[in-house]
Image: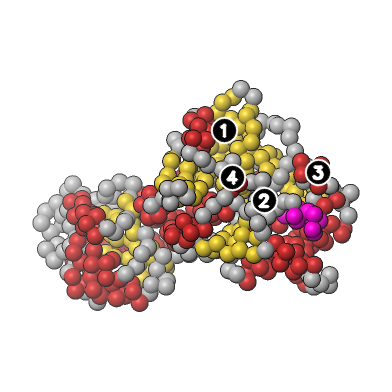
Amino acid sequence: MAYKQKLTFGLIIGTRDIFSAKLGLAAREILLPKIEALGHDYVILPVDATVSGSVDSYEDGKKCAKLFSDNRDKIDGIIIVLPNFSNELGIVNAIKLSGLNVPILVQAMDDDNDKVDVYSRRDAFCGKISVCNNFYQYGIPFTDTVYHTYPLDSELFEQDVKKFASVCRVVNGLRNARIGAIGARPAAFQTVRASEKILQATGITVVTVDLSEILGAANKVNLQSADLKWKLAEIKDYGKIATTVHEDKIIRQAKFGVAVENWLAANEIDASTIECWDSLQHNYGCASCLTMSMLGEKLMPSACEVDIAGAVSMYTLMLASGNAPALLDWNNNFGTDRNKCVCTHCSNYPKSFMQNELTIGSLDVLGTVLGQEDTFGAVKGMVAPGDFSYFRISTDDTKGVIKSYLGQGKFTQDPYGMDGGIAVSQVDNLQQLLKYICKNGYEHHVAMVRGSVAEIISESIETYLGWSLYHHK
């Protein structure tokens, strides 16, 4: 699933026949324009389908369930608004009978202290507990709002919907993800082994292709084709290429990029991972980093070294943030500052992740072994300072689960005299995190993205996906 900016929410406004129908109508007049203003669409019972278009009785719940079921291909999440002590039976059956398995947000409205007479009181404070109690009984997971109750026409609701929309993108995206694995895992990197079957249990499908098929397709790309000409122009506009690089090396890289993108499109791949060394260099003569960087910039994350779980981690961060993620090594200490480290890769960092001047050249370390002439296509530079979120999943085959860790940090301006893609990173209590990584058998790769999205991912995993999660704070 590509990043979906505009979502469609199923909306339920609750009520109970002992309360004024005007409360439901007033909530509707606030709710619908707010959802539209936030850039989303909605599905809701017509106002004449029930009393005020709200859900009260079991019969109301059945009407809402049918409407939602008829629109199941459109609905990304459900938002429930309680303007009063609404009938929990109508609401829980609307969800149950619809058969939808999407995230749910439950919001309840404040009472005003000067409006608690029998005609104006809401009692939604109490009603929300009853609705959530029924969800618990029925095994229906849901997301709560920042406060137990608050006014619907507040900025708090807008913030909660924005966060909830991101949760919907993460949960729905991962439950239907298609991860492309191009080539075989480098033999030396047992660390990135992963279980396709454990991933499939969540809905994540791994689609494989032999590297030779991609290289064969690359070699067949016509030099006069529009695709190749467009890719060459895209590469030359992407970053600074050294004048010493021969045009034939750029063409070779472009043909590889065209072949990869064609395969991804043909197989509807959301994120990928590539056998980036050393068969590619020996049998074709380029690095894959530039192609992977450019894919990431298009919000199609691509991980190194056939790190399937790394690709899933990158895809998760992209869904949560809408930004281009990168895959990095936890690579070096930073002097004696134990809350800083240096994260690096060759690299395949997207341009918007680096937010700094980048150059395109040959692989540095691998270039000394495989030859500079066969390793063109590395994206190099310092990652600019700013906030970031990091995330990593791993399939724990002995326990049969997906485990993960998550947190936030800052990229700093500290200089560091190393080649490749360099990110000097600061994480509070870093040593505890590193101990956790080592003791629990995690890989040396970590996915990072600009922005603060740890709470979104935490809610997605703990409430809906059920993976094991360590949230480092």
SS at circle 1: strand
Q: What is the spatial separation of the Cα atoms under label 4 and label 1, in whole angstroms?
A: 24 Å
Identify the residue shown where x is 60% and y is 46%: 190
Please tell me which of labels 4 and 2 falls first in the chain.
2
The residue wearing badge 2 is 186
Q: Which residue is mark 1?
A: 426
What residue appears at the point 37 percent right and 63 percent down from the top-left corner? 102
Front position in the image: 182 or 175 = 182
User: Dot 4 lies on which element?
Assistant: helix
Q: Horizontal placement of 139 versus 381: left or right?
A: left
Q: Secondary structure at mark 3?
A: helix
Left or right relative to 145: residue 349: right
Specify the amino acid type for callout 1: Gln
- Using the image, determine if residue 60 lies above or below residue 391: below
Marks 4 and 2 sit apart, C-alpha to C-alpha, by 10 Å
Spatial CA distance of label 1 from label 3 is 32 Å
Residue under numbered circle 3: 369
Residue on which disc 4 sits: 191
Mark 1 or mark 3: which is in front?
Answer: 3
